[in-house]
Image (tube, rainbow, N blue to C red):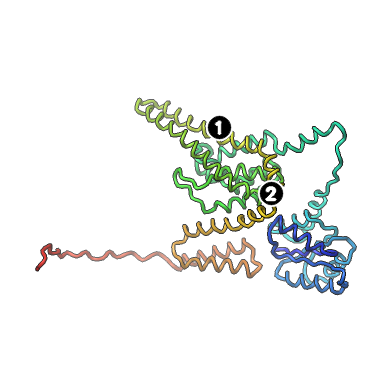
Amino acid sequence: MTGMIVTGHGSFATGITSGLRLLAGEPAYYEMVDFLPEDSVEVLAGKLKGAADRLADCQDIIIYADLTGGSPFNVSIRMKMEGQMPMEVIGGANLPMILDGYLAREGAKDAETLARSGLTAGREAMVWFQVPEEGADDEYEESEDKNMTFFQALLIGLFAYLGSKRTPWFFGVTGGWNMIGRPLVAGLIVGLVLGDVRNGVIAGAMVQALFIGQITPGGAMPADVNWAAYVGIPLALAAGGTGEQAVALSVPLSMLGLGLFNFIMTINAYFPHMGDKAAAKGDGRGIHRATYLAAVPSFILRAGSAMLLCYLGTPVAEMLINNMPAGMLHFFEVAGKMLPAIGFAMLLKQSLSKQWMLVLFLLGWVMIGATSMSVTALAIFATAVAIIFVMAQGSAPATVPAPQSTEEEDDCYEE
């Protein structure tokens, strides 16, 4: 993991960190260093060295300074030249650049990779707004409102149908509901359709964590993951939101989608009777006809609803996200981190055969929190422990049946 230090004149680091917390939550492996009016350059150097020491467990460090050539930037350069720890320094930092680095560092190879992507993000975020010339207002407003094209909404609606429950295409439930219908896969698909794969995958992972412990036995569903994935994620991305906003939209949409699912199931109750009548007459084509006709209402309602909501609902979603109070956004941010924990707890309750196995998960949590071990390394270590555990158990001893008693009980009772 790459550690991050933000530094600048006055309260620059504190202000940037406040914005970062609002957008991405409480940052980890992150330090902020303000260069206050009463601080000397020596005091600033001590603060920066202390921040670097607190990030000693990280593989390297990237420092974001506010002004190229200023004291925070120059002191950071001297620290880099001393070479005590691999370090990259960026001058002229802004919030989009720092946010990009914070979100990208999980998958980034090193601090140099973050520095390159951060410079691009910081430059692309700078915009010079000019008032449109007379006569260009209508064209400007039209381009701003149309965040998602009709073709993009149509593609998302099609995948929403293919990934819905009770869909016979794409290997049935296995390839549809259990693969395309998962929010993680849906986030990738939506990201490809909208041209924002990275944020699509991030939003899909966050929404997937909400429903990871959900079971859908038979026709019973506690929430409709399909609308959460194929309506909530694209609306959030098209409106310029992040994973937190996708979670905020997905939770209520999953409840509304449940009503749609029950309505579809009610309509489809007609087609089994049609198939039964055809079977009673020995009409094989009638049975096939009933089977395929049952997919028509699902296609119209699933694909049509997702397409219309994505195409027409983008401005509404943008308005909701832009006008969402900070307190409500913080609530969804906290809920988005708590609900995955509940989902994983439900999954553990279903998969653990013995209660003492919780100790193994506690051990993994301690290792990931107390060391700099990556998730991939921990997964490999856990696999090795599981193999050793299974081999140590060996084959279960055969159960010897208890001998049956041949004595007959006397039904008579003596007084």
Nearer-the-camera pick, 290 or 45: 45
Question: Does 230 appear above or below 62?
Answer: above
- In which quadrant will I find the N terminus? bottom right
Q: Nearer the viewer, mark 2 or mark 1?
A: 2
Q: Position of residue 282 (x, y in %)?
A: 36, 26
* Amino acid, disc 2: Met
Q: Quadrant of residue 154?
A: top right
> Residue at the location (51% across, 44% down)?
174
Q: Position of residue 34 (x, y in %)?
A: 81, 67
* Amino acid, disc 1: Ile
N-terminal of the two: label 2 or label 1?
1
Residue that label 1 marks: 300
Residue 108 is at least partly visible in this image: no
Give the side of residue 145 with respect to residue 382, left or right: right
What kind of element bears circle 2?
loop
Mark 2 neighbour class, 10 Å CA radius: few under 14, some 14 to 19, many 20 or more = few
- In which quadrant will I find the C terminus? bottom left
Q: Position of residue 22 (x, y in %)?
A: 71, 56
Give the side of residue 135 with respect to residue 98, left or right: right
Residue that label 2 marks: 324
Q: Quadrant of residue 141?
A: top right
Nearer-the-camera pick, 237 or 322: 322
Nearer-the-camera pick, 232 or 36: 36
What kind of element bears circle 1?
helix
What is the C-alpha distance between the residues marked 2 and 1? 32 Å
Q: Position of residue 399 (x, y in %)?
A: 32, 64
Residue 19 is at least partly visible in this image: yes
